[in-house]
Image (cartoon, rainbow, N blue to C red):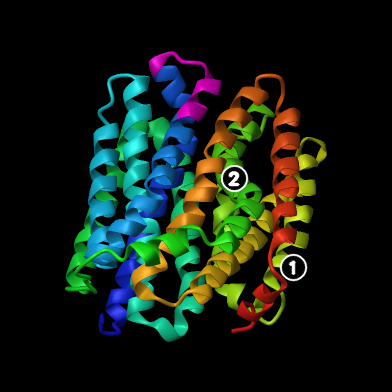
Amino acid sequence: MVQRSGFGIASVMTSRLFYSLNWYNISPALIPISQTFGVPLSYTGLALSSFLLGAGIFQLPAGIVSSKIGARKAALLGLYLMSAAAIASAFSANFVEVVVLRFFVGVGAAFYFSTAIALLNELDPENITRLIGYYNASFNLGAGAGIIVFTPFIPIFGWRYDFLISGIAVLASTFLLQIAIKKGDHYTSFDLQGLRSRLLDRRTWLIGIGLVGLWAMNYTLPEYFKTYATLIGINPNIAGIMGGAIPIAGIAGGILATTFRRYNPLRLGSVFVIIIGLLVISIPELPYLGLWFVLVFTGLVGTIVISLEYGIIALMDRSSRYMALNVGLINSIQIGIGATVPTIFGFIAVYGFSFSWLFLGTFAIATLGFLLLLPKGMLRYFNK
């Protein structure tokens, strides 16, 4: 077992922050990238989707590898790959290279995401649900910084330095994690029966598909809002801050998530998702202050629901060996389906953003129907 370490937990949270920087730092770079390589703005959605494709496809391999070599080694592998691909993308010679390298940034993200949660469980299993909330708060802090910091940065220094600095930041946090946690759990062989039973767990599949609409919204809305706000006449710097408000509000959501454990998170979460979906659909009709409300509410409440979702998955199976696989499965489901949403959103936006917001909000609400198929016994996991 890994010894409990405050420094180790802090190093995971730090790496999570810089890891998330590389999820959203491309948002303020979409228009400059399209101008640099002479591609239509709608095509930039391919760079977003290729990242998600890499992150989605390799979630399960990451969980399987983690069950053999341990969470620490798998997480470090992901961070090193992510930093290398991010740095290389700063030197892309054409748009195709951007898309391909974003795919490998996503692969690195896949190997880190779920394995880092498993690593937190090894460090402090008694407080794992609280740590998951803080883990998501760290993600939102980095995601917000990726949008807010680089929105004014890119017009001055260019989008290439955006990717370069973000990649170097991940690399530095990787060194910190390697120093802070010197060894982790290691297993001698694969347990095929254990892998199979978890991959076929119907509950995980239903939760993953049921909340995939919210997941896709949490990714697509911050990525495209800055572009949308700029096109409707809002100052680009203010538009960047508005887009960054979504993940920044999620910091509070991650911290507050554990206070909602006394309720039924999936029922409460479904109500929240319906409200968020309707608000997103109404974006084209809202005044300036109304837009701010939607962004802050979505970031705050969306992160609460997603943190509780991971908490349920963690409590369903407390095995440190398979926690990365369990979280990786739900991530794979949501990223695999959600990866198509930014591209669809971008192509619909050609006919007007009103249709794109309608699609995004409706999709989030529609997928909730899968939660109705969960067994009633799932309630016992909610209040632990």
- Magenta stretch: includes residue 45: yes
> Between disc 1 and disc 2, whose residue precedes?
2
What label sits on residue 19 in the rendered view?
A: none
Residue 13 visible? The answer is no
Residue assigned mark 2:
216
Query: Residue 240: where, in percent of width, then height?
Result: 55, 41
- Name the residue at 58% across, 41% down: 220
Disc 1 + disc 2, Cβ < 8 Å: no
Amino acid type shown at disc 2? Ala
Mark 2, other Cα within 10 Å: few <14 / some 14–19 / many ≥20: many
Amino acid type shown at disc 1? Leu
What secondary structure is marked by label 1? helix
Query: Residue 144: where, in percent of width, then height?
Result: 50, 52
C-alpha separation, residue under disc 1 versus residue under disc 2: 19 Å
Residue toward you, 105 or 61: 61
Mark 1, other Cα within 10 Å: few <14 / some 14–19 / many ≥20: few
Residue 152 shown left or right of residue 192 in the figure: right
- Name the residue at 69% across, 66% down: 266
Question: What span is in magenta?
Answer: 37-46
Residue assigned mark 1:
268
What secondary structure is marked by label 2? helix
- Name the residue at 67% across, 62% down: 301
Residue toward you, 64 or 356: 64
Residue 283 shown left or right of residue 8 in the figure: right
- Name the residue at 63% across, 31% down: 345
Residue 286 visible? The answer is yes
Residue 200 shown left or right of residue 280 in the figure: left
Quadrant of the drawing holding the C terminus: bottom right
User: Seen from this angle, which residue lies furthest front?
Assistant: 193
Query: Residue 180: where, in percent of width, then height?
Result: 21, 73
- Magenta stretch: includes residue 190: no
